[in-house]
Amino acid sequence: MLPYKDFPTIGEGNTPMIQVKNLCEELGLKNLWIKNEGQNPTGSHKDRMSPLIIARAKSIGMESVAVASSGNAGASIAAYAAAGDVECIVLTTESMNPIWKQAIEKTGATIVYTKEAMKRWELMKGNVENGIWYPATNFINPPVGSNPFGVQGYKTIAYEIIEDSEEIPNIIIVPCSRGDLLWGIWEGFKEVFDAGMIHSLPRLIAVEPFPRLKKVLEGQPYVDSFIGDSTYTPSVGGITVTYQALKAIQESNGEVVVIPSHQAETEQKHLGKHGIYAERSSSLVVGALKYLIKKQAIQEEDKILLLISSNGYKELF
C-alpha cells in the first residue's frame, strides 16, 4: 500500500500506543490512548514522510532535495537525505530555533535563509521548475500539501493503530496545520477498510490554534488566507488550508476544535505530569479533549486516541 518498498530507514515507525490510566481517571474516561510520534528518530511524525520522499527523488535521478521548513520537516528530511546519500537544502528564516539549526547542520545539509517565510516557496519553485531540486514540501500558494509520495508514509500510523488495538479507537484527535498528517491517517484507515480488513472507521478531530479549517467548514473558501496567532505553537502555524484536510474531516464525520496557542504550555505541563513530554503544538490535543468532554461530545465509553506528533526536547521556551 506504499509507493516504494525500498527506502532509506533509520528506525522510524512502530511508535508506542500508551494507555495513560491516571489521565483516564482524571478525565472520567475508560479508554484513552496516546500514540507518541515523538519517539521517531528525529523526534516527530515527519520521519514517516521523509523516507518515501528520498526514495522518490532517487528513483527519478534527482541528486538534491529541498525542504521549506523552520523545524521538524527540515531536521527530518536532512537526516534521511544523509542516510540516502542525497544532497539536502533547507529553506528557512533567521528566526529558526537554534536547536533545529544545529541538528540540520550536523547532517551536512545546506541551510538557505530568506527574509520572509513566503520567499522560501518562491525560491523553491524556481529551482524545482528548473529541474535543480526535488521538492519535499509545498511551494505554491494556495498550498496543495507536502510531497504526495511522502504523505503516503503517514498511512502507516493508521496501520499501526489497527495492529495495536483490540478495538480501533472511534475518535482520534490530531494536531493540524495544513493537514498532511490528518489526510495520511485518514487515507490509511480508508484503504484498510476498503480492503475489508476492518469494519469501522474513526472520527477525526483536527486541532488548530486559531480558526482556519473551522472557518472553511463554516463556508469560507479553503483557498483564502486566515490570520491568527500561533506564537507558542509554530509547528501548527500557517495561514492556509488544504483541500484534503477539509475532505478528511468531512469524510470521517469529524470536526475541528480551536485551542488558542497561548494555552499550549498549560496543556504541555498537564501531559508532562503524566510522563509525556510533548511539543507545545502537539499538546493542544489535550485541550481539545477537555473541550469535547465539557460539551458532552465525548462519552465515558468512547475509545479515544491522542496523536502526539512531536516531542518537546527541541523547544527552548
Image (spheres, rainbow, N blue to C red):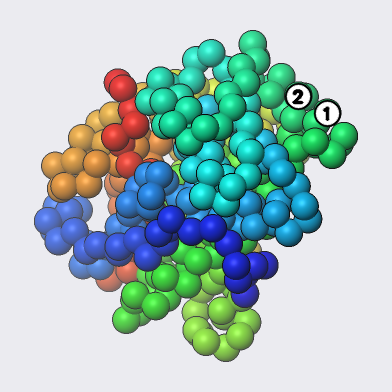
Q: Residue at x 40, y 70 (%)?
A: 161
Query: Residue 123, labelled with which disc?
Result: 2
Which residue in the protein does label 1 denote?
126
Q: CA distance from mark 2 to mark 1?
A: 6 Å
Residue 181: horizontal and vertical position, in percent? 54, 52
The quadrant holding residue 6 is bottom right
Question: Residue 258 at x, y = what percent?
Answer: 46, 38
| x and y, in percent, of residue 272 in the image | 19, 41
Towards the viewer: 222 or 57? 57
| 113 relative to 202, above or below | above
Which residue is outermost to the right? 130
Q: Secondary structure at mark 1?
A: helix
> Is residue 24 depicted above or below 71 in this figure?
below
Q: Amino acid at mark 1?
A: Gly
Residue at image point 67% right, 40% down: 65
* Side (left or right) of 314 relative to 2: left
